[in-house]
Amino acid sequence: MARVDLQITRRQFLATGLAGTALVGTGMGPGRSNLAMRYPDPPWFASGEVVTTYNYCDMCPWRCGIAVQSVNGQVIKIDGNSPDPKSRGKLCGRGQAGVSFMNDPDRLQSPMIRTGERGEGKFREVTWEEALDYTAEKILAIKDQYGPESLAIFGHTSGDFWFTDYFAQAWGTPNAAKPSSSLCLSPRDEASTLTFGFPVGGHEPLDWDEMECITLIGSHIGEDSRNTVMQDFVEARSRGAQVIVVDPRFSAAAAKADYWLPIKPGTDTALLLAWANVLITEDRFDRDYLDRWATGLDELTAHVQEFTPEWAAGITDLSADQIRTTARVMSDRLPRAVIMPGRHVTWYGNDTQRMRAEFLVNSLLGAYGRHGGMYFNKSPFLEPYPHPPFAVHGSSGGCSAEPGEESAELPLGPTGKARADGARETFLRGPTAMQELIDPMITDDPYRIAGLIVYGVNLLNSIPMPNRTIEALKKLDFVLAVDVLPQEHVAWADVVFPEATYLERYDELSTVAYKTPFIQLREPAVPPMYDTMPGWMMARELGLRVGLDPFFKWETIEEYLNTRLRSVGSNLEKMHDAGGVIIQEGKPYLEDFEADDETPFHTPSGKIELSVAELAEAGLDPIPVYEPTEEPPDGYYRLLYGRAPVHTFAKTQNTPDLSAVYPENELWINEDEATALGYSNGDRVWLENEVGDRTGPISIKATQRIRKDAIFMAHGFGQHAEGLTNANGKGASDTKLMSRYKLDPISGGAGLRVNFVRLVEGG
Amino acid sequence: MASAFLLDMTRCIGCEACVLACKAGNQLPVNTQYIELIEHTSGTFPDLVGGFQNHRCYHCADAACVAVCPTGALFKEDGLTRLNPDACSGCGYCVQACPYGVPKMQNGRSTKCDACASNVSGGGSPWCVTTCPAQALEYGDRDEIIAKANSRVAELKDRYPKVQVYGETQAGGLGLIVVLPDDPAMFDIPTDPQPVPVSVDIWKGVVQPVSMGLTAVAAVGAGVLGVIARRNHLAELKELEAREKAGVPAGGSESTEEEQ
């Protein structure tokens, strides 16, 4: 079996990795002048040569291109990379804190093997050789006993490609999953694929530059800190675009809205159907567009007749007048008017149908492929590294997945087993549903899942029913955790691989489906700190130890990357010199397809399918209907959650600079409700769900900015991990209150807003 | 030539990128920040108006902090209020005097935005301006910034009937020109910032020149004097902080104020 001397590889990294990176200064002049007398210490950029490396940010999944500035071997400042179409020289607060994330003293520093019981968090530090050999031995044993399908691989964040995609497919497990699918955007991408024949894609293709009306349904622009979207939204609005915000909460975006619709949670589909009713019955839709590009208009017309604004008003807590007015505001601006496809859309378990309803309204507005509406995104051309055929076709999806068509057949593993997540039985289609793989770990049904590799997923703070996840962790034969930080679940691992952060490693190229498709480079600014290792190297070293040598023929990551870049006439040096990004031509508008006599819609009919036959055949509604959502019992509130602008998921709460700015979440509760309960601003309370799970304490934020039937908090807090100095025990955890979820029968998404909680004293 | 920031609060969406860019670019200690986003909401559900105050140094022309600073650590340059922390004695008078409550004491020294003096003098922009995704921040010649703010206000009247330029005249003219979507009171900003209190004027006019003179004469002894003065100042500061804690924190009855 081929082996690589890790020490040599790491030295080579130091020698060739950094030297091979052409070093370029920022062009910024030395910062001292007449101020020298009054500012005795030179600023960092005047204290040595400033070296710029290019990267894509890993502080959230949005992947902004960044320029990383280092002086004297220290990374100091990260800026948005100007030529990068996503960042355009700008960067959000989390991206600015990348250096703080890298320098977090709580980082995992050495490979470890468990010595205590699972969950105790007792480990001994070992060499990489021992950690890798031990892991290889364990997963080979699982493969021998149960087959390769019995190893599940969960991955998140931008290095997940190496484990969740590349290693998983080479190894032969269809049970590779990403939380960004079934815990986030599966419903919208399945709805989009059913309606248009393509998923939305990681970067929502809104044609902001010419947009005249934007509608947000539960999208929290600003609070979710998506750099590009903030830029585009603010610019469009300042240009005069009308803004309609549908949200139970007066969000940062709602505060910028021309129309705020404080909808009753769970009733969005009723609003959407009423909007469709107004557009159709008042003949305010783009009939020519639909005649040319859509099927099912007659069915849709008949379908929406009964869904009047008056009907929806009684359901949504909005007035019929509000509903009618906002529909007219949109239609007055069509096709330069769109409802933004949300991102985290796993809300109530009927989410694919809600997203379908959104897309039907967008279709009535004639938005797709039109200037100021939705453009057609395109993936950049870039050949894969040549490798033997994979043992199994990938189906983990995720927000980094490229637009493509789902194969009709579920991929089968080498021993003939399909995914264990119940796909095609409990839900119709879509990528692997992570939360549906937990039960099989406990029940062995449909077959035993005996091992788990967790790459960067905060297991106990992202998957609902964390008590069930712990039960599964207890039963598994083997658990490998790959992470930068000692997150809560790491205490449950048998082996821990400490990863180098994105600032310390080369990585797979990032390919972005966009109006102008582009490729982003990740090159290290500094060598890995401590005894950490890049994910690609771990995957390769493990691969070489389990017989996957043919997939890892490349000796160095530079060789891998240069081979891929050759297909676009570039290489690492050229790409660096070009500013870390390669931009290609897109095909964004309908006229581009008409000129080629093609259709952009890859549905069975080649058109927008307003009514979907596949759904009817499966016994589901071919056109969405409104299904009531369960109401909170007396004394309970619906648990809503979202983002604080300086935090991402359950990942950044420990980052020193970010923790300093927003150390713990707050409980948004309507001021009148808080008063009635005897609470005021700043009071500390605990939260309890219907089955008695508790989390807290959390500070009350008594505010007029939320409805009386719901509470809201930022996700990702309330973690319990002793190794996380800043995050441990801070605030309350929404995940720990999710004792249930509602499975979306179409996409496999986990509807998470179906939990009800009350305020209690003490934990 | 005076320089100034433009802060367009109709664009700010509260993402706090400026806060973190400032911390990173200026290499601030983890517990220090020069910018705070403060949420303001008025009204009753569902009839609400809201926005953010991007709370930071306003760079007053008649800067109360500069007037009271006994050591010259705070000084005016290019229309902006700079701070040389190494010259700060830690007296805390600037904290007391600032009508906006901006300077903070950290580790016995005053700390506040100095408009990225070092970076700007090297040809760059303040870090917050460079990164702002909403492009709510700009930096440049003060006259041009004021002209731009006025033309923005003219464009924004339809959407924001009360929109106004703030900072053209306040405190002798600010180095932070704000496009405010509503009345200053809505953001807890003084319409007419309080002039420097008389007691401070006396202190500045009489006591400071005397002590400065002594310092100049006794070049070696200055260190000793400095230590004594500093000890006194720290004691006063403690008292000040205690008073502040006991008192009612800033915040109007019509608006709720919460740190993000």
Image: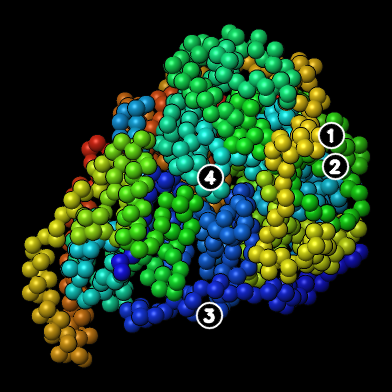
For label 4, the residue is A232
Nearer the viewer's eye, disc 2 or disc 4?
4
Mark 1 residue element: loop
Q: Nearer the viewer, residue B107 or A94?
A: A94
- Determine if marks 1 and 4 fall on one subunit: yes
Asked whether disc 2 touches disc 1, contact meaning CB atoms under 8 Å apart, the reply is yes
Q: Which sits earlier in the primary sequence, circle 3 or circle 1?
A: 3
Under mark 2, the amino acid is His
The kind of residue on which mark 1 rests is Ser
Residue located beneath label 1 in the image: A407
Which label's residue is closer to the chain start, 2 or 3? 3
Chain-order first, disc 1 or disc 4: 4
Distance from label 3 to label 4 (Cα)?
A: 36 Å
Of callouts 3 and 4, the N-terminal one: 3
Disc 3: host chain: A
Give the SS element for disc 3: loop
Tell me how far mark 3 sits from mark 1, CA to CA: 54 Å
Which percent across, then down, holds residue B189? Answer: 25, 48
Mark 1 or 4, closer to the camera: 4
Please name the residue that numbered disc 2 is placed on: A393
Residue A128 seen in the current view? yes
Residue A48 bears which disc, if any? Answer: 3
Q: Quadrant of residue B121?
A: bottom left
Which residue occupies the foreground of this view, A310 or B145?
B145
Q: Quadrant of residue A468?
A: top right
Q: Could you give the CA–CA distance between mark 1 and mark 4, rounded to whole angstroms?
A: 34 Å
User: For the point 57% across and 12% down, which residue is it?
Assistant: A281
Is residue A335 positioned above or below B58 on the image? above
Q: Chain of mark 2?
A: A
